[in-house]
Image (cartoon, grey):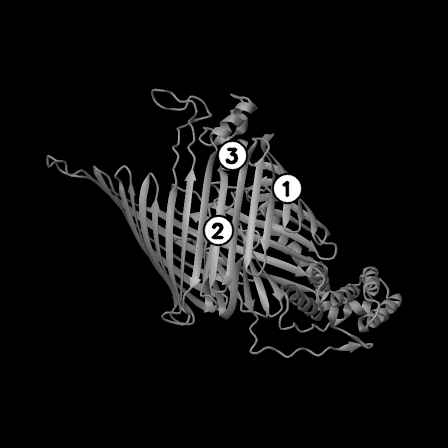
């Protein structure tokens, strides 16, 4: 019955995916892509995957708590269409080893943040992933005390599990890494995850020779034997005897090798029905449903200043409801796991029902895909709407991505589809291929729009990752326009648990180099219509004129100064090149004379500097509160700015939490215009049951813009009410 259930469920969950293919709504830019769990020794590593690259990651509390807050910056992606949305929530996959948790975006502040709420206190460490799109949270398995080592059971005189030798007092880093892998392989065998054990032992065998190499060679054969890979197990045993012909291990391997002659390649019916085989199959279905109503109203008062002759003021007032909408979000994931496969179906949809007559409702599917992963043959395929994982694909797309592992360190991939950003106009189609060689990937991609070349590019991604350091480099070169599209380097370094550094160097074309940039400022959304008045060469020349260049350098540091306090700070400098005027306009009226439009010249920004110190406190007033004090100073040739921000999150009771913030900003332009803004906000959430919660947001924003002749005061009040159900 288990096998039948697993085979039918994917098709039930696949129906929304098929339905989404006919939805015309444009895709919504959701930042949270996926959460996965992996057991390693005495911890579970939760990988939070984001839809865009991020940097400048710092978190608090530093070691444990029921709420973990992660501050981060979203890297510019060269596309104005991929704007992250607020209050998105993903639920962690089920696990018996660690507390369950949710990840929520909170973007209505100076620096975006992710809020992780555990259902009970968790002990953790955190670091950036190897590709710039992931955050790794290592969560300690919450046992009351470390269990004693399990006894080694024997069958026919042979051990069922390996004995992991204790590390010497002065062990090398290589032996420490090998010991960790050996223990992971042992744990995988204990859980009957034979293919996971094969993968782990193979990773150990790829290391330079160490104290655990010999044992790994024996037990990779055992894992293959238990996975019914008799021929491969025989090769592993024969290799062992060539390398280590004497000793206790050789005697065991000779017994195992001799016994293989009596084992058939196909598992017996009894073996299929045994509890050990059934233990390797799992079906997990989880997700959430949420509904929130948003309302906002604005009022703007404008007054002319009194003239030097004392003339009367000229005043005007405008007020209106600017938001009234119901936002409904559905997130569902089905995972189907066995010794051989790890498959999943994912569907995420957001429906925005707008009650204002001047605005329309919309439905946006951000993810709808079916994925197959085979752990034996090491191939994978994902089809449907999905976010880019690199390899030259610049955004969310509808299509297919496939990969095949030729060796443990060599993998080939292919991708094809159409971009699904939510700008108006045609959707570019693309096809690409890439090769992963350990930490290095190279790719090539060809993209067309309305039947003509849009983008041809080659590039590379280089990743480095270890326990306290990570680095990621991306280089993308467009051969059609003969220019560098992206050159980026980011690194994170944690020399000790209480201190971290981050660095970002980023050069990119903004928007990304492509022929459809010719539509920026045009009076049409069709490249075909532009081709009626110009050639392809002229079209690409127009696109080049409408493509800018941005540069960014940033360095930051975080230091734990006491059990409750940490300080951090960032220094950032950026600039954006000037853009020349493009298109033609009537010299008298300034109106465009062709459908290509007329875009005026844009001046260069010059170097924009930002210095942002932060003071972060944890558990100041209770066992789970967080307080952030942030200052910022901004300077550029065009303006000077200062800001102050304070944020607090507290749990008033076990079920009631309160978030409050106050933000003040002041900006003085070189023209003499002064703009100030102050915004207090308050959010309450009540956990009715473990799977059901209510929340409410209330906020007020006051801003003033003052010029030499006029004062404009703007007031806006807003609130939201809603619920969330996890299943």
In three-dimensional space, the C-alpha distance between marks 2 and 3, rounded to whole angstroms, equals 37 Å
User: In the displayed structure, does residue 532 sit left or right of residue 442?
Assistant: left
Which residue is pictured at 52% across the width and 21% down the height? Answer: 534
Residue that lies at the very extreme toward the front in this rendered image:
170
| Helix, strand or loop for disc 1 | strand
Q: Which of marks 3 and 1 is in front?
A: 1
Residue to which mark 3 is pinned: 425
How busy is the neighbourhood of tag 2: few (under 14 within 10 Å), some, or many (20 plus)? many
How busy is the neighbourhood of tag 1: few (under 14 within 10 Å), some, or many (20 plus)? many
First reached walking from the N terminus: tag 2 or tag 3: 3
Against 383, residue 457 (above or below) is: above
Task: Give coordinates of residue 376: x percent, y percent.
Answer: 74, 57
Of the 4 image quadrants, the one containing the N terminus is: bottom right
Quadrant of residue 167 in the image? Answer: bottom right
Residue that lies at the very extreme toward the left in this rendered image:
309
| Helix, strand or loop for disc 3 | loop
In three-dimensional space, the C-alpha distance between marks 3 and 1, rounded to whole angstroms, equals 27 Å
Of the 4 image quadrants, the one containing the C terminus is: bottom right
Q: Is residue 356 visible?
A: no
First reached walking from the N terminus: tag 1 or tag 2: 1
Q: Which of marks 2 and 3 is in front?
A: 2
Numbered mark located on residue 117 in the image: none
Residue to which mark 1 is pinned: 443
Residue to which mark 2 is pinned: 503
First reached walking from the N terminus: tag 3 or tag 1: 3
Quadrant of residue 34 in the image? Answer: bottom right
Task: Give coordinates of residue 97: x percent, y percent.
Answer: 59, 70
User: In the displayed structure, does residue 24 sit left or right of residue 718?
Assistant: right
């Amino acid at each position: 019955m288990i096998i039948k259930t697993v085979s039918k469920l994917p098709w039930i969950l696949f129906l929304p995916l098929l339905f989404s293919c006919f939805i015309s709504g444009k895709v919504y830019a959701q930042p949270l892509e996926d959460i996965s769990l992996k057991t390693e020794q005495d911890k579970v590593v939760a990988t939070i995957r984001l839809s865009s690259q991020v940097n400048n990651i710092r978190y608090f509390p530093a070691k444990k708590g029921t709420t973990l807050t992660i501050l981060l910056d979203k890297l510019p992606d060269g596309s104005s269409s991929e704007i992250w949305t607020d209050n998105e929530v993903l639920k962690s996959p089920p696990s018996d080893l660690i507390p369950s948790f949710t990840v929520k975006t909170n973007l209505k502040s100076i620096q975006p943040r992710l809020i992780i709420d555990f259902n009970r206190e968790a002990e953790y460490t955190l670091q950036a992933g190897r590709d710039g799109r992931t955050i790794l949270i290592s969560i300690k398995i919450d046992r009351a005390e470390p269990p004693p080592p399990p006894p080694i059971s024997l069958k026919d005189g042979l051990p069922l599990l390996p004995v992991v030798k204790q590390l010497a007092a002065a062990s090398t880093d290589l032996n420490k890494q090998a010991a960790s892998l050996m223990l992971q392989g042992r744990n995988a065998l204990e859980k009957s995850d034979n293919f996971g054990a094969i993968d782990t032992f193979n990773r150990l065998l790829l290391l330079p020779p160490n104290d655990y190499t010999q044992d790994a060679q024996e037990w990779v054969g055992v894992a293959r034997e238990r996975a019914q890979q008799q021929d491969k197990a025989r090769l592993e045993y024969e290799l062992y005897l060539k390398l280590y012909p004497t000793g206790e291990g050789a005697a065991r391997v000779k017994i195992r090798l001799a016994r293989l002659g009596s084992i058939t390649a196909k598992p017996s019916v009894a073996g299929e029905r045994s509890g050990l085989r059934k233990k390797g199959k799992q079906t997990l279905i989880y997700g959430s449903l949420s509904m929130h109503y948003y309302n906002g109203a604005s009022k703007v008062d404008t007054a002319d200043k009194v003239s030097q002759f004392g003339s009367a003021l000229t005043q005007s007032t405008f007020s209106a409801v600017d938001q009234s909408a119901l936002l409904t979000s559905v997130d569902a994931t089905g995972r189907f796991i066995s010794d051989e496969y790890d498959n999943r179906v994912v569907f995420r949809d957001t429906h925005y029902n707008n009650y204002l007559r001047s605005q329309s409702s919309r439905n946006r599917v951000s993810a709808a895909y079916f994925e197959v992963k085979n752990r034996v043959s090491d191939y994978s395929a994902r089809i449907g709407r999905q976010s880019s994982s690199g390899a030259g694909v610049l955004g969310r797309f509808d299509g297919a991505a496939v990969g095949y592992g030729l060796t443990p360190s060599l993998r080939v991939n292919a991708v094809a589809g159409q971009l699904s950003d939510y700008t108006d106009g045609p959707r570019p189609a693309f096809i690409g291929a890439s090769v992963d060689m350990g930490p290095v990937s190279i790719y090539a991609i060809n993209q067309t729009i309305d039947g003509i070349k849009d983008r041809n590019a080659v590039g590379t991604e280089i990743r480095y990752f270890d326990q306290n350091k990570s680095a990621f480099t991306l280089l993308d070169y467009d051969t059609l326009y003969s220019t560098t599209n992206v050159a980026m380097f980011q690194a994170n370094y944690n020399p000790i648990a209480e201190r971290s550094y981050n660095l970002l160097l980023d050069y990119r074309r903004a928007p990304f180099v492509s022929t459809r940039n010719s539509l920026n400022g045009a009076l049409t959304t069709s490249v075909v219509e532009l081709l009626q008045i110009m050639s392809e060469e002229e079209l690409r020349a127009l696109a080049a004129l409408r493509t800018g260049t941005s540069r960014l350098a940033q360095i930051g540091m975080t230091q734990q100064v006491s059990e409750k306090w940490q300080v951090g700070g960032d220094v950032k400098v950026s600039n954006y090149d000037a853009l020349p005027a493009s298109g033609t306009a009537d010299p008298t009226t300034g109106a465009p004379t062709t459908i290509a439009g007329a875009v005026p010249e844009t001046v260069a920004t010059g170097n924009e500097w930002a210095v942002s110190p932060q003071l972060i406190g944890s558990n100041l007033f209770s066992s789970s509160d967080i307080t952030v004090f942030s200052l910022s100073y901004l300077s550029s040739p065009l303006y000077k700015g200062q800001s102050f921000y304070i944020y607090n999150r507290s749990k008033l009771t076990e079920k009631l939490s309160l978030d409050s913030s106050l933000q003040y900003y002041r900006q003085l332009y070189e023209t003499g215009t002064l703009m100030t803004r102050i915004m207090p906000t308050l959010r309450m959430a009540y956990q009715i049951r473990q799977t059901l919660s209510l929340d409410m947001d209330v906020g007020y924003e006051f801003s003033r813009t003052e010029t030499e002749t006029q004062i404009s005061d703007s007031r806006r009040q807003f609130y939201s009410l809603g619920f969330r159900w996890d299943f």
